[in-house]
Image: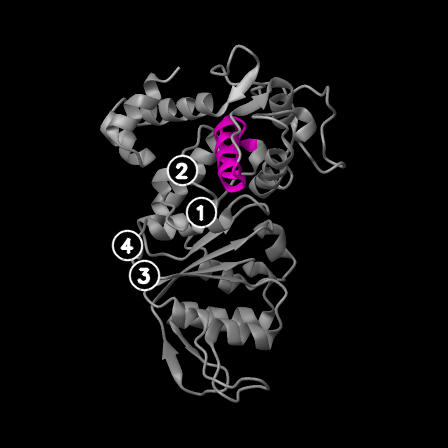
């Protein structure tokens, strides 16, 4: 994935994984995009479940319809009813106007419910009816409303243990999990890390108006030795801070502000088999963004069987730009 993390136009064509876990995730996601079945996305916090949901929507037959996102965590039943199904004027104190809910707003598109496992039993029952029959009632109304909605749900909980504790309705679970997509944690994407790192540095540099060309070897080694418990969200935060405090155009190890409890020691080597530096790094011990980008382009070209036209389309660049990137040192 090479676009900025807030790109609303992201599609599955822009995701590329070299690690087996991510390749399996993308196979599941592409299959999901070709259907209209409800999807359940599983993964730890910060792995990019919302981004993947949007990419599935943008790659599906509903791409021209709305993508409506809703976080179900820590909401009262009344507020959840209002948010999901809307309310009529006077339905509760302060309800001065009729308001459409998320289901109604997502008509002919996709509704993404994040942290669906945090819903109360009452909320789960109402979601089940809406998903199963495509109908609902606004709060304060007895009129049945209908909406054509494709549901994508997500949770960071391990579903097996969650269901065993009777905290989530099994009938709802089987209804929302027509297809299940599992997003791997960042610690299982070591081969993808150089590209993700380059993309984040490029994004943060543009945002902050700085010119960062790469990392010192010691900084790269610390990054590859780190377990990234906060996943992509933590990677984004660490790189934002590193770019902000970097004294020059290369990020040093001192600029990496990990959480103290999880931080690797400065001398800690990478895990066995994990890349300490990509083979395409500069001879002076700097991992450059250009080298990581070229490695990604070559990887996508290989995935496309050497077909430059298909590779350029998958990367979202012109054929001439592809040739230029391949020719760069």
Residue receiving disc 2: 15
Contact (Cβ within 8 Å) of mark 1 with mark 2:
yes
Magenta region, mostly helix, strand or loop? helix
Are there few (<14), some (14-19), or many (20+) residues within 10 Å of tag 2? some
Is 194 covered by the magenta stretch?
A: yes
Q: Secondary structure at mark 4?
A: loop
Please state if 73 lies on the left or on the right of 137 as rendered: right
Residue receiving disc 4: 61
Q: Which residues are magenta?
A: 188-209
Please state if 51 lies on the left or on the right of 147 as rendered: right
Q: CA distance from mark 2 to mark 4?
A: 19 Å
Please state if 126 lies on the left or on the right of 222 as rendered: left
Q: Upstream in the sequence, badge 2 or badge 4? A: 2
Task: Say which of 146 and 201 sits in front.
Answer: 201
Vertical placement of residue 150 versus 53, above or below: below
Tell me the quarter of the image containing the C terminus.
Answer: top left
Q: Secondary structure at mark 3?
A: loop
Q: Which mark is residue 52?
A: 1
Q: CA distance from mark 1 to mark 2?
A: 9 Å
Q: CA distance from mark 4 to mark 3?
A: 9 Å
């Amino acid at each position: 994935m090479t676009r900025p993390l807030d790109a609303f136009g992201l599609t599955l064509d822009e995701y590329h994984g070299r690690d087996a876990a991510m390749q399996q995730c993308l196979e599941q996601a592409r299959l999901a995009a070709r259907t209209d079945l409800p999807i359940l996305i599983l993964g730890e916090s910060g792995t990019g479940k919302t981004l993947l949901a949007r990419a599935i929507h943008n790659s599906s037959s509903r791409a021209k319809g709305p993508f409506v996102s809703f976080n179900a965590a820590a909401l009262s039943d009344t507020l959840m009813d209002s948010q999901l199904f809307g309310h009529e004027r006077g339905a509760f104190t302060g309800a001065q106007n009729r308001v459409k809910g998320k289901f109604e707003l997502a008509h002919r598109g996709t509704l993404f419910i994040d942290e669906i496992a945090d819903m109360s039993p009452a909320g789960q029952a109402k979601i089940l009816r809406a998903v199963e029959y495509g109908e609902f009632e606004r709060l304060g109304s007895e009129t049945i409303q209908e909406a054509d909605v494709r549901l994508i749900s997500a949770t960071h909980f391990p579903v097996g243990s969650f269901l065993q504790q009777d905290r989530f309705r099994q009938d709802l679970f089987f209804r929302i999990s027509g297809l299940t997509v599992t997003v791997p944690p960042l610690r299982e994407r070591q081969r993808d890390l150089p590209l993700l790192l380059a993309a984040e540095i490029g994004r943060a540099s543009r945002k902050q108006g700085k010119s960062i060309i790469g990392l010192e070897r010691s900084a790269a080694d610390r990054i590859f030795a780190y377990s990234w418990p906060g996943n992509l969200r933590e990677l984004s935060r660490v790189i934002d801070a590193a770019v902000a405090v970097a004294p020059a155009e290369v990020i040093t190890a001192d600029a990496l502000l990990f959480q103290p409890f999880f931080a690797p020691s400065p001398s800690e080597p990478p895990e066995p088999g994990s890349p300490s530096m990509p083979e395409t790094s500069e001879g002076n011990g700097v991992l450059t963004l250009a080298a990581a980008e070229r490695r990604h382009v070559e990887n996508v070209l290989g995935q496309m069987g050497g077909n430059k036209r298909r590779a350029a389309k998958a990367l979202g660049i012109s054929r001439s730009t592809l040739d230029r990137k391949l020719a760069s040192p």
